[in-house]
Image (cartoon, grey):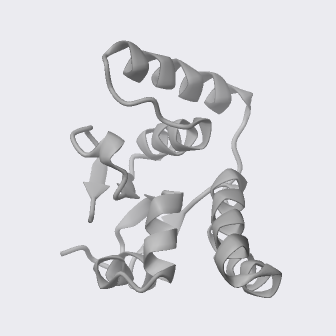
Amino acid sequence: MTTSTTRYFYDSYAVIEYLNGNQKYRHYIEDADGVLTKLNLMEVYFRILKINGPGAAKDTVNSFSKYLIDFDLTAIAGAMKLRLGLMNKKHLDISCADALGYFLAKKLEIKFLTGDGAFRHLENVEFIR
Protein backbone atom coordinates (compact mmCIF):
# COMPACT_ATOMS: atom_id res chain seq x y z
CA MET A 1 0.00 0.00 0.00
CA THR A 2 1.23 3.47 -0.80
CA THR A 3 1.61 6.35 1.61
CA SER A 4 0.31 9.87 1.19
CA THR A 5 3.80 11.07 0.23
CA THR A 6 4.02 8.72 -2.76
CA ARG A 7 3.79 10.41 -6.15
CA TYR A 8 2.73 8.95 -9.46
CA PHE A 9 2.54 9.94 -13.06
CA TYR A 10 -1.14 9.44 -13.91
CA ASP A 11 -1.41 7.79 -17.31
CA SER A 12 -4.65 8.56 -19.16
CA TYR A 13 -5.62 4.91 -18.65
CA ALA A 14 -5.42 5.35 -14.87
CA VAL A 15 -7.50 8.52 -14.87
CA ILE A 16 -10.19 7.00 -17.08
CA GLU A 17 -10.35 3.85 -14.94
CA TYR A 18 -10.70 6.00 -11.84
CA LEU A 19 -13.47 8.04 -13.45
CA ASN A 20 -15.21 4.81 -14.50
CA GLY A 21 -15.34 3.77 -10.85
CA ASN A 22 -12.52 1.22 -10.76
CA GLN A 23 -11.92 1.09 -7.01
CA LYS A 24 -8.37 -0.19 -7.49
CA TYR A 25 -7.39 3.32 -8.64
CA ARG A 26 -9.21 5.23 -5.92
CA HIS A 27 -6.36 5.26 -3.42
CA TYR A 28 -3.82 6.35 -6.03
CA ILE A 29 -5.87 9.35 -7.10
CA GLU A 30 -7.51 10.38 -3.82
CA ASP A 31 -4.84 9.57 -1.23
CA ALA A 32 -1.57 9.93 -3.15
CA ASP A 33 -0.09 12.75 -5.16
CA GLY A 34 0.27 12.71 -8.92
CA VAL A 35 1.09 14.54 -12.09
CA LEU A 36 0.11 14.39 -15.76
CA THR A 37 0.50 16.47 -18.91
CA LYS A 38 -1.94 18.34 -21.10
CA LEU A 39 -1.61 15.47 -23.58
CA ASN A 40 -3.08 13.11 -21.00
CA LEU A 41 -5.87 15.56 -20.29
CA MET A 42 -6.62 15.72 -24.02
CA GLU A 43 -7.02 11.94 -24.14
CA VAL A 44 -9.24 11.96 -21.05
CA TYR A 45 -11.30 14.88 -22.38
CA PHE A 46 -11.92 13.06 -25.65
CA ARG A 47 -13.02 9.87 -23.91
CA ILE A 48 -15.40 11.69 -21.54
CA LEU A 49 -16.69 13.86 -24.41
CA LYS A 50 -17.61 10.74 -26.43
CA ILE A 51 -19.42 9.09 -23.55
CA ASN A 52 -20.80 11.88 -21.36
CA GLY A 53 -20.74 15.05 -23.45
CA PRO A 54 -18.95 18.41 -23.32
CA GLY A 55 -20.10 19.48 -19.86
CA ALA A 56 -18.75 16.39 -18.15
CA ALA A 57 -15.55 16.56 -20.20
CA LYS A 58 -14.95 20.16 -19.19
CA ASP A 59 -15.64 19.41 -15.51
CA THR A 60 -13.24 16.47 -15.59
CA VAL A 61 -10.45 18.48 -17.18
CA ASN A 62 -10.95 21.26 -14.66
CA SER A 63 -10.76 18.83 -11.73
CA PHE A 64 -7.56 17.20 -13.00
CA SER A 65 -5.84 20.43 -14.09
CA LYS A 66 -4.29 20.76 -10.62
CA TYR A 67 -2.03 17.80 -11.49
CA LEU A 68 -0.59 19.37 -14.64
CA ILE A 69 3.13 19.57 -15.26
CA ASP A 70 4.85 20.99 -18.30
CA PHE A 71 7.61 19.52 -20.43
CA ASP A 72 10.34 20.93 -22.64
CA LEU A 73 12.02 20.02 -25.92
CA THR A 74 14.56 17.85 -24.10
CA ALA A 75 11.71 15.75 -22.68
CA ILE A 76 10.19 15.40 -26.15
CA ALA A 77 13.48 14.15 -27.57
CA GLY A 78 14.05 11.81 -24.63
CA ALA A 79 10.54 10.42 -24.82
CA MET A 80 10.75 9.72 -28.54
CA LYS A 81 14.13 8.00 -28.12
CA LEU A 82 12.61 5.90 -25.36
CA ARG A 83 9.61 5.07 -27.58
CA LEU A 84 11.84 4.00 -30.44
CA GLY A 85 13.96 1.93 -28.08
CA LEU A 86 10.87 0.13 -26.77
CA MET A 87 9.64 -0.49 -30.31
CA ASN A 88 13.02 -1.93 -31.30
CA LYS A 89 12.94 -4.29 -28.32
CA LYS A 90 9.67 -5.76 -29.65
CA HIS A 91 7.46 -4.11 -27.05
CA LEU A 92 4.04 -2.99 -28.15
CA ASP A 93 4.05 0.37 -29.87
CA ILE A 94 3.06 2.98 -27.31
CA SER A 95 1.59 6.38 -28.10
CA CYS A 96 3.62 9.57 -28.03
CA ALA A 97 1.67 10.74 -24.98
CA ASP A 98 2.40 7.46 -23.17
CA ALA A 99 6.07 7.61 -24.08
CA LEU A 100 6.28 11.16 -22.75
CA GLY A 101 4.49 10.23 -19.53
CA TYR A 102 6.71 7.22 -18.97
CA PHE A 103 9.82 9.29 -19.71
CA LEU A 104 8.73 12.05 -17.31
CA ALA A 105 7.93 9.52 -14.58
CA LYS A 106 11.44 8.12 -14.85
CA LYS A 107 12.96 11.61 -14.93
CA LEU A 108 10.98 12.67 -11.84
CA GLU A 109 11.76 9.36 -10.13
CA ILE A 110 8.09 8.55 -9.59
CA LYS A 111 6.03 5.53 -10.63
CA PHE A 112 4.06 5.49 -13.88
CA LEU A 113 0.52 4.48 -12.88
CA THR A 114 -1.32 2.57 -15.60
CA GLY A 115 -3.23 -0.54 -16.55
CA ASP A 116 -2.05 -0.42 -20.15
CA GLY A 117 -0.71 -3.88 -20.97
CA ALA A 118 2.23 -2.46 -22.93
CA PHE A 119 3.73 -1.35 -19.62
CA ARG A 120 3.00 -4.49 -17.58
CA HIS A 121 6.60 -5.71 -17.38
CA LEU A 122 8.51 -2.45 -17.61
CA GLU A 123 10.47 -1.00 -14.70
CA ASN A 124 9.16 1.98 -12.75
CA VAL A 125 5.51 1.07 -13.40
CA GLU A 126 2.67 0.63 -10.94
CA PHE A 127 0.48 -1.69 -13.02
CA ILE A 128 -3.14 -1.96 -11.87
CA ARG A 129 -5.95 -3.77 -13.62
Dividing the picture into quadrants, the one containing residue 14 is bottom left
Residue 87 lies, in percent from the top left, at 41, 20
Residue sitting farthest toward the left: 1
Residue at the (37%, 75%) spot, across then down: 28
Q: Height in image: 5 above or below 35?
A: below
Residue at the (24%, 73%) spot, across then down: 2
Q: Height in image: 125 above or below 121?
A: below
Which part of the image, by quadrant, shows the N terminus?
Answer: bottom left
Which part of the image, by quadrant, shows the C terminus?
Answer: bottom left
Q: Is residue 70 left or right of residue 34?
A: right
- For the residue pair 85 and 35, the one nearer the viewer reads as 85
Q: Height in image: 112 above or below 14?
A: above
Number of numbered discs: 0
Q: Is residue 98 left or right of residue 115?
A: right
Residue 77 lies, in percent from the top left, at 64, 22
Residue at the (74%, 85%) spot, across then down: 59
Residue 86 lies, in percent from the top left, at 39, 23
Residue at the (65%, 77%) spot, across then down: 51
- For the residue pair 127 and 34, the one nearer the viewer reads as 127
In this view of the protein, can residue 93 be seen by the observer?
Answer: yes
Residue 82 lies, in percent from the top left, at 47, 23
Q: Is residue 16 left or right of residue 43?
A: left
In this view of the protein, can residue 65 be seen by the observer?
Answer: no
Residue sitting farthest toward the top: 88
